[in-house]
Amino acid sequence: MPTKRFAVLLFIVVFGFVSEAATQSQPTPAPAVHTVRVDATPGHATNSFIPTQTLGAGIDRLPAGAIDKLINPATMSKVLSAGWQPVSYRQNTELFVEAWHWNPQGTWSDHSDPAGKGYFTGNPTSTEPIQHSYGYPLPHRGFTRNDGTGNDGYSRMTDGDLNSYWKSNPYLSKAFTGEDDALHPQWVILDLANAQQVNAIRIAWAEPYARRYVVQYWTGDDPIKRPTQGVWQAFPSGAVNDGHGGDATLQLVSVPIPVRFLRVLMTESSNTCDTHGSADRRNCVGYAIRELFLGTVGADGEFHDLLRHTPDQDQSTTYCSSVDPWHEASDIDPKKRDQVGFDLFYTSGYTRGLPAIIPIALIYDIPENAANEIAYLKKRGYPVSYVEMGEEADGQYMLPEDYAALYIQWAAAIHKVDPSAKLGGPSFQGVNEDIQVWPDAEGQTSWVRRFVNYLRAHGRLSDLAFFSFEHYPLEPCKIQWSSLYDEARLVTHITQVWKLDGVPAGIPMLITESNIAWQAAENSVDIFGALWLADYIGAYLTAGGNGIYYFHYMPLGMYHGCNDSYGTFSLFTVDKDLVIQQPTSQFFASQLINLEWVQPGNGSQQVFPAASDVADEAGNVLVTSYALLRPDGQWSLMLINKDQWNPHPVRIAFHNEDEGASTDIYFSGPVTLTTFGRAQYQWHPTEKGGFAEPDGPAAVSTVTATDGTLYSLPPASITVVRGKVAK
């Protein structure tokens, strides 16, 4: 045993002995007896689901070489033993402002360069198995960073290079939407980091340029993070109705005013062709800017620029409405982050042969490439449950009308090759409240409502076969034990938000990616992670959710997270070669959910309301309860005791109004209890990661139940109680 590990365990043993001795020195009051009550009336079920369709996990993009190490029988058998069923293929290139070559074999739209450039379309009929696929960073990018890109890449509008340029997505122009360009205004935003005195802007236009545009400043705090707490106010001299391109200098106001955020809103294009030529009409629509300069013009007419122009993250920050997916073969991601190839994905064994959720690239791609992807999968006979349209449009700061306009075009292309394909999205980031955007002409600020309204107004709401979002409910560096009290409310609330926003009744709601927070830390691997996972799954299914995908199925390794601790988005810890070392707490929670609480297989499980009266003085529910009536006729309750220190003995009572009985009924006969808590698992952090000791398994016992049976729930534990009730 390593020295550090031995020291940690020795401390635990000594501390545990002292604590026990101290406890024995004075009597401990008997815990109060509480009740878990199940509404077992048949018509009161809140949901029903089939595990092989509902309880899944996600596989995402990985570092180069990792996939080959993780697709082996030893690793796969351990991963599959967690019990998750269908798989959601996560599409990460959209987050990095990249085009995705789902098939490395394909054709380029511009045939003038043998190396390849233009708009890429994957080959739908290639016979060589696709093992790996990669992203291609877009050369006409207008983001310094956004909620996806992080510190990768930079904007071409403040990079100091007049030969590079940002260009908007041509598929948002009238040539493709069929609507006036003013209905899909494109925009760029400058962030000066703090308010500075401004009275002039210089725009070095590329082709096509804006003939009609307006320069505005934000009156509030932050238009990106707080889009409803301010307005875009036009500068007194900020409107241009007859632009001629070139280098345009505008004195926006006579006397400089303090400005932090500035927007150029473009509503009419010159429709002149960019540097890629006139052979492809996509080169000749939209808007393009080579460089932006912002500051003041003095009495002498000299322009004083406030911006930093560098090809890196040090540049003055810019945001944009969209990006042209034009790129070249040489733009391939130099880090070679690997999206597993579809043939390897489907034949590896991870999908269990079940239909998978498959993404298409939409925000930074072309419809023909997406349609060919679906055609390829169909030709190979690979089962697809749903097709997710793009990835995290909200994280790319895309307005709902723009996303919807692309959605309609992509849907038309996909349904030509597969009319039965079930399409959906928008695959939102993990949020706990409604996504707000700048108000439209009617003052509407809800992203979802405006997206749904756009589809409905265009007669295309039928193209929305499911609604998807991600669930990362907690802010990573602010997680405390008390954060556990919030999960059931958070996931139930956001589900209701989408319904209130107008997601049509009957459309499945899928959480296609989920975990505690977007940054791994110690709470993901200690007992907190297990309790959170069980509570989240139970609460979402009780709230009517139709699909859940745990993230991340394949083991990823440990990462340094908040509070100087290590965690992982994974069910296991691994060594440097990605060989599994230990299961984490969420592995055992997964087994309790998928193999104990749920009856595995294709049978329909009914979810019934259940509640406990165990609460603290502040009103926080300490024991949450989730009840299933399984196909085998057994009632199965998953009980999560969030009290760190105290056990809670509970009675479990069932009430069926259809029986007309005034009294409760109870479990009767043999009842199985499966418990996972600190007695079965403890995480011990170290300077470079950590280890679990003990490390499972869950404890299993059987009792012969009567109406007087008490079920003891240990501190910080999950307990599944399963059996039949008295007639």
Image (cartoon, helix red, strand yellow):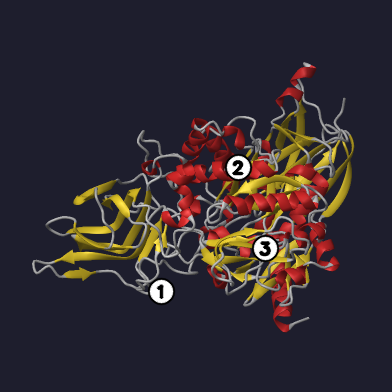
Q: In this view, does 145 lie above or below 269?
A: below
Mark yes or no: residue 381 visible.
yes
Q: How crowded is mark 1: few (under 14 residues within 10 Å), some or many (20 or more)?
A: some
**Who's the residue at 87% across and 28% down the image?**
726
Q: Nearer the viewer, residue 580 or 370?
A: 370
As drawn, is 545 to the left or to the right of 443?
right
Answer whether labels 3 and 2 touch (C-beta < 8 Å): no
Judged by depth in the image, the label closer to the viewer, 1 or 3, is 1
Image disc number at residue 544: none
Which x, y percent locates residue 657? 74, 20
Quarter of the rendering containing residue 588: bottom right
Q: In this view, does 650 lie above or below 104?
A: above
Quarter of the rendering containing residue 443: top left
Quarter of the rendering containing residue 676: bottom right
- Tag 1: amino acid: Pro
Which x, y percent locates residue 60? 66, 60
Disc 3 marks which residue? 525
As drawn, is 437 to the left or to the right of 112?
left
Image disc number at residue 411: 2
Q: How many marks?
A: 3
Image disc number at residue 311: 1
Q: How far apart are labels 2 and 1 at the CA level? A: 36 Å
Q: Which of marks 1 and 3 is nearer the N terminus?
A: 1
- Tag 3: amino acid: Val
Q: If the image is split into quadrants, where does the C terminus sit?
A: top right
- Tag 2: amino acid: Ala
Which x, y percent locates residue 219? 27, 50
Mark yes or no: residue 531 visible.
no
